Image (tube, rainbow, N blue to C red):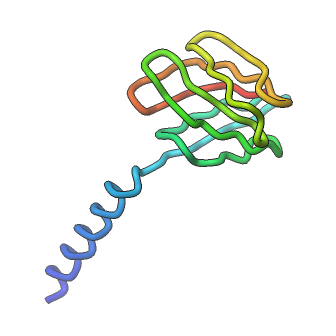
Amino acid sequence: MIRPLHAVAALVLGAALVLTGCQVNSHTCRNGECHVTTTGTGNTLDIMDWDVRVTEISGDSATFTVDHSPPVRIAVGRSERVGAAKIRVTSIEGETLKFDVK
């Protein structure tokens, strides 16, 4: 009876991840600069005491807000000031976004 219960639990977890749009967020900071990897949009990331939010990811750019600033679209390879932060988009692969914040 334990195996069917595990199977049901795995199916419920899988369905929850699909419905919520599983997000993966990680960042490392050193000397006042953070390297961030995130998947998907909508989550607020706490980076160096700023609330950084990715509101849109398109093929070659992403849109950010920092501490409720106006949204700023940044193309891959470019950097822009967003609120008090400077953000550089380093890569976009599907829904996975990598960027630097300082």
Q: Nearer the viewer, residue 20 or 39?
A: 20
Based on the displayed image, in which of its 4 quarters is residue 75 positioned? top right
Give left or right: position of 86 versus 20: right
Q: Residue at x 60, y 36 (%)?
A: 54
Q: Position of residue 60 (x, y in %)?
A: 48, 15
Q: Nearer the viewer, residue 22 or 72?
A: 72
Q: Position of residue 28 (x, y in %)?
A: 69, 37
Based on the displayed image, in which of its 4 quarters is residue 93 positioned? top left
**Residue closest to the far front:** 70
Q: Residue at x 40, y 56 (%)?
A: 20
Q: How many marks?
A: 0
Q: Residue at x 55, y 45 (%)?
A: 42
Q: Position of residue 82 (x, y in %)?
A: 76, 26
Determine whether 90 is above or below 14 in the image. above
**Residue closest to the far bottom:** 1
Give left or right: position of 86 versus 28: right
Quadrant including the C terminus: top right
Determine whether 67 is above or below 90 in the image. below
Determine whether 59 is above or below 67 in the image. above
Determine whether 7 is above or below 64 in the image. below
Quadrant including the N terminus: bottom left
Q: Nearer the viewer, residue 68 or 61?
A: 68
Q: Position of residue 23 (x, y in %)?
A: 47, 48
